[in-house]
Image (tube, rainbow, N blue to C red):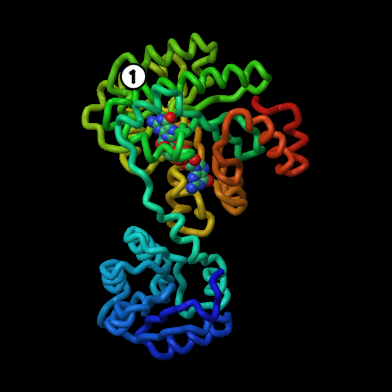
Amino acid sequence: MPNKPTVKIMLLDDEPFMLRLLARQLENLGFTSLFPHASGAAALEAIAHPAGAPELILLDLNMPEMDGIEFVRHLVEQRYTGSLILISGEDERMLASASKLVQAHRIDVLGHLHKPVQTEALACLLASWQPSLRGAGQVRRKAYGADAVRAAIANGELVNYYQPKVVVGDGRVVGVETLVRWRHPTDGLVYPDQFIAVAEANGLIDDLTHAVLREALAQSRRWADAGLPLKVAINVSMDNLRSLDFADFVSREAASAGVSPADIVLEVTESRLMTDLRVPLEILTRLRLRRFRLSIDDFGTGHSSLVQLRDIPFDELKIDRSFVHHAYADPTLRAIFEANLSLARQLGIEVVAEGVEDDADWNFLRETGCDMTQGYFIARPMPAPDLPGWIDTWRTRLSPRTATELAGAIAP
Ligand code: C2E
Ligand code: MG
Ligand code: MG
């Protein structure tokens, strides 16, 4: 929380009454360095002045001359680095789209408020505001080149992390998703969004997937030998599905690790459009014939869509986290979530909800009849040795009744 009396807050609303009301609410919350403006032009002029930029702007979307959306475009041109709260009498979907638009401009949106603004709602947004931490999320991330990624694979710097997948009904841990990380010798832990696309674009994704798969299968065997039977999911890029050898490679590796195909889930995402689906379709169909489980990942985003669902014999559908987190409170997300769930039900496909981040998400899922879930609320991805200890902790977090049911039974 910023130092309230000194933090500069600009208020922008064409109605003088609303300006006075907002100012009084902020003063009551302890914020006294307030700069009200009744037009976008006046506000921009103030911001352009050296030392005039506020740390937070409360912005009315509906203004007669320059509306809030246009004002945001000018803020971007002026390289505004503060935060923003949107205010409007429009409906929730309109405010949510406007928030998305502002976020796409990389401006930090604390949230949106309906008119008339409730003091508690305003206080709630301000309580979560941490202007000093803003920069942290915005550090420009390092770009890695093909040579660096090639060397990382060759030198064994890639490590698998595993995120638990649990049954929604009773919390049983039935599997894990393998998520690769790069233990960089100088940069620390590097996440897949910084090197998967590089590997795909430079013909390295087969080597990467082979390394991840081999380690995941060996780990699965170790868990099974230790009395921990878990289904292990692996992410497969569409670029892995260009060469017909892939199905044989996966089968061979599973056989030599002694892991049954039914315990291996291949999660497929189509991040960019593939025009010719014949080869991927052949590979996936052959894998399915051999009883590997196929999962459509990030369903509803990118090109992970109904066409794939129509053509590929998936066993599992993962509802993308952007439709899961906060769906309980957002009618649009909830409608999309429920439609996906019902679609999968009718096709006889199991459903995994991704991105359960808090207990409200978890409680929502428990009412929906969704099969499985994963997310930060349950556990973040972790190195393999941490998993048994985490399972013990998870059991104690579940209700006593469920924990008793679970005693000794981790998987079916
Ligand atoms: P994905 O397969 O959809 O994996 C889920 C991602 O969401 C993971 O990010 C995971 O850490 C994150 N996540 C899990 N629970 C939550 C939550 O509650 N909230 C939020 N905000 N995020 C959550 P990660 O590990 O950074 O991986 C990103 C993507 O990179 C993966 O998305 C997957 O598409 C790709 N990827 C990861 N490992 C591999 C791999 O071995 N091969 C390929 N081809 N792609 C991989
Ligand atoms: Mg995945
Ligand atoms: Mg996903």
Amino acid type assigned to the residue bearing label 1 in the image: Ile
Q: Residue at x 42, y 65 (%)?
A: 109
The foreground one among 256 and 410 is 256
The residue under label 1 is 283
Residue 406: x, y in percent?
73, 32
Residue 343: x, y in percent?
43, 39
Residue 169: x, y in percent?
63, 39
Quadrant where the N terminus sits is bottom right
Give the quadrant of residue 9: bottom left
The foreground one among 253 and 80 is 80
In the rendered image of this protein, does residue 318 appear above or below residue 6?
above
Q: Residue at x 40, y 69 (%)?
A: 82
Give the quadrant of residue 301: top left
Q: Residue at x 28, y 37 (%)?
A: 272
Crowd rating for badge 1 (residues with CA inside 10 Å; few <14, some 14–19, many 20+): many
Given the current orientation, which residue lies at the most extreme front position?
186
Side of 289 relative to 199 (left or right): right
Q: Is residue 354 visible?
A: no
Q: Residue at x 49, y 16 (%)?
A: 261
Give the quadrant of residue 393: top right
The foreground one among 405 and 177 is 177
Quadrant where the C terminus sits is top right
Given the current orientation, which residue lies at the most extreme left position?
275
Side of 380 relative to 292 (left or right): right
In the rendered image of this protein, does residue 329 appear above or below residue 306?
below
The foreground one among 257 and 349 is 257
In the rendered image of this protein, does residue 3 appear above or below residue 312?
below
Q: Is residue 135 visible?
A: yes
